[in-house]
Image (cartoon, rainbow, N blue to C red):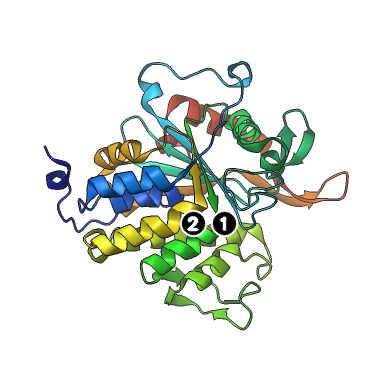
Amino acid sequence: MPYALRHQRRTRGWHIVMGSVLALVLLGAGAGGVGAYKLSRSFDDQVATLSTVFPPAAVRPPASVGAVAEAQNILVLGSDRRGAHNASITDLTGQRSDVIMVVHLPADREGVWVMSILRDSWLEIPGHGQAKINAALSWGGVPLAVETVEGLIKTRIDHVAVVDFEGFQAITDAVGGVEIDNPVAFASSKLKGHTFAVGKQVVTGAEALAYARERYAFADGDFTRVRNQQRLFKAMLSTVMSSRTVTNPATLTRLIEQVTPWIAVDDGLDFAYLTGLELQLRDLHGSDLTFFTLPTNGTGTSANGQSIVNIATDELAPLQEAFQTDTLAQYAP
């Protein structure tokens, strides 16, 4: 059946559930059936490809076998500064990842689970000792970040997307703003003079970026920051998947053109892979998307004086088993 016929207008905005990664938001753009071939070429030609992604097989968890092998884990790494990249998203020298998420797609594709990992989570980084997890990207690039996360969940990562925080602003501006439902009012430290009120409000690109980056306004810092990021991701995806976006070729083209400079992916995470996922996930609703955070035991101070987030190590075994056996649907975060 031709691609365009498979993707007629639908009222459900959540049949593609990848809101935690800007690269995968483009999957939503590809689902409209408008100029699909052109969008595919535009995405694949413009998005940056990471040359080295995975660590040596000897240091990775065993590959999944049987039905469980059909599940997919996508690591999303984001930053709100470019470090020493020389304006290239693929050069990650000195860049720490301020957003770390694992997107889990179960083998039956009956839902999507997105686990956030707080950037100050204190753990063993292979070859470097105890440190905050966001240092892995800076010290060893994407392969060390993958190795560190795989050691945490005891399961292999299948794909990786690196996203610059500026992409939040690009997506929001490309679709004309997104509506968030903010639960706690706060004065932005990133956008001087602006206050985010309680309740529903449409935010511009600059406001979306400030909303996603804010942590100083909250007593619990990154804990609220992560919840706000998750809230913004959902809002962006809902807007991208609205009929006014997916049926407008000009908007879709502008979305890809503005967002791809801020994204880098492994060579398997191309437009064909994303549209294949779209077919598998097309019947999902918003209620089928589950966000949760790696279990923690609050904050503390490391032996060398750093402010850190303590991982609840006694709660990791059930989480690791859920990833290994593809049973996150039964896991209670």
Q: Give the x, y percent position of residue 36.
A: 23, 48
Query: Vertical placement of 225 versus 150: above or below?
Result: below
Indicate the secondary structure of the residue bearing disc 2: helix
In this figure, which residue is indicated by the disc labeled 1?
A: 226
Q: Nearer the viewer, residue 282 or 39?
A: 39
Contact, mark 1 vs mark 2 (Cβ under 8 Å): yes
Amino acid carrying label 2: it is Gln
> In the picture provided, is 295 more to the left or to the right than 158?
right
Specify whether residue 105 is in view: yes
Amino acid carrying label 1: it is Val
| CA separation in Å, label 1 and label 2 | 6 Å
Query: Vertical placement of 241 versus 201: above or below?
Result: above
Indicate the secondary structure of the residue bearing disc 1: helix
Q: Give the x, y percent position of residue 1.
A: 11, 37
Q: Give the x, y percent position of residue 119.
A: 66, 49
In this figure, which residue is indicated by the disc labeled 2?
A: 230
Residue at 23% in and 63% down: 248
Q: Residues within 10 Å of mark 1 (few under 14, many from 20)?
A: many
Q: Nearer the viewer, residue 155 or 24?
A: 24
Residue found farthest to the right: 304
> In the picture provided, is 101 more to the left or to the right than 26?
right
Quadrant in the rendering for residue 310:
top right
Residue at 51% in and 31% down: 157
Q: Give the x, y percent position of residue 107.
A: 35, 29
Q: Residues within 10 Å of mark 2 (few under 14, many from 20)?
A: some
> In the picture provided, is 135 more to the left or to the right than 160?
right
Residue at 31% in and 53% down: 29
Specify whether residue 183 is in view: no
Q: Nearer the viewer, residue 238 or 245?
A: 245
Residue found farthest to the bottom: 193
Query: Vertical placement of 198 versus 302: above or below?
Result: below
